[in-house]
Image (cartoon, grey):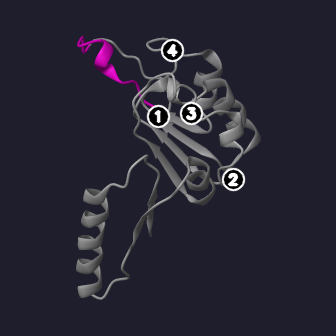
Amino acid sequence: MDLVYYDLRANDDLEGYVADYSAFLEAHGERPIRCRRLDTLEQLLCEADVVSLHAVLDDSTRHIIDASRLAQVKDDAILINSSRGPLVDEEARVEHCRTHPDFYAALDVFEREPETAPRLLDLAQRRSRAAPRRGHSLDPREDGDAGGA
């Protein structure tokens, strides 16, 4: 396993941590891993088996993952969004999951929280795992499970 990431700036802390862990693995007879920053988000989407989003939400990142970018991911990729719901165009993701049966999405944030679109709930039963983020409510009696586990 290797780690690739995209960020506007190099993440020296991440790269150093992975290099240290890689040296530990190698010292124990395991295959080392490497970490490298890619130049573009598109390059990352084409190469990664798992894409995990960790971005702020602003005008430049809203729907950063849209239909055109979903078309670039591997057919059997996994998309994880635990950052901000509107980073991913929900309708595009639903359609991508419907047309790419090996693609998988895992998320605990939704585009229009706390509501969840019916199409998304239906899809969650089959090709996604969705768990509600309870940041909008501290009432433990609320059960907002969107399907899946």
Magenta stretch encompasses residue 101? no
What is the CA distance from the residue labelled 2 to the residue labelled 1? 18 Å
What is the CA distance from the residue labelled 2 to the residue labelled 4? 26 Å
Vertical placement of 138 versus 125: above or below? above
**Residue topped by disc 1:** 107
Which label's residue is closer to the chain start, 2 or 1?
2
The one nearer the camera, 123 or 86, is: 86
Q: Secondary structure at mark 3?
A: loop
Q: Which residues are magenta?
A: 130-140
Instruction: For the residues labelled 3 and 2, say whether their Cβ atoms are less than 8 Å apart.
Output: no
**Residue topped by disc 2:** 75
- Residue drawn at x 47%, y 51% as measured from the top left: 6
Q: Is residue 144 left or right of residue 24?
A: right
Q: Secondary structure at mark 1?
A: strand
What is the CA distance from the residue labelled 3 to the residue labelled 2? 19 Å
Magenta stretch encompasses residue 137? yes
**Residue topped by disc 3:** 64
**Residue topped by disc 4:** 112
